[in-house]
Image (cartoon, rainbow, N blue to C red):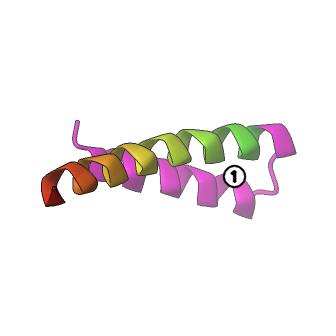
Amino acid sequence: MSIDLLIFKNKARLEKLIREDADYDKILAQSKRLDKYVVIKMREQLKSTC
């Protein structure tokens, strides 16, 4: 699965959790998951520019 799609899906999940006023720990875990994919995407972009 592409990183862009993973970022999109996880961002949507995070937004849903926030809208539904989910438990803080669930929101935090989802945010960390999204951050992981964003970091991967940023590393890919840095490699392609070098």
Q: Nearer the viewer, residue 39 or 12?
A: 39
Extent of the magenta region: 1-25
Residue located beneath label 1 in the image: 17
Residue 20 placement, left or right of 44: right
Q: Position of residue 7 (x, y in %)?
A: 40, 51
Q: Residue at x 29, y 45 (%)?
A: 3
Q: Residue at x 61, y 53 (%)?
A: 14
Q: Which quadrant of the rendered structure holds the C terminus?
A: bottom left
Give the image location of residue 11, x and y in percent. Answer: 50, 56
**Magenta portion: prevailing SS class:** helix
Task: Report whether residue 5 is seen.
Answer: no
Image quadrant where residue 8 sits? bottom left
**Residue 22 in the image, given as x and y percentages of width and height:** 80, 48
Taking 50 as reference, is 12 left or right? Answer: right
Q: Secondary structure at mark 1?
A: helix
Give the left or right position of residue 49, taking residue 33 as reference: left
From where the camera sits, is residue 34 visible? yes
Answer with left or right where residue 22 lies relative to residue 7. right
Which is nearer the eye, 20 or 48?
A: 48
Q: Nearer the viewer, residue 15 or 39?
A: 39
Quarter of the image with the N terminus is top left
Q: Rate crowding at label 1 as few (under 14), some (14 to 19) or many (20 or more) other CA atoms within 10 Å.
A: some
Q: Position of residue 20 (x, y in %)?
A: 75, 57
- Amino acid type at image mark 1: Leu
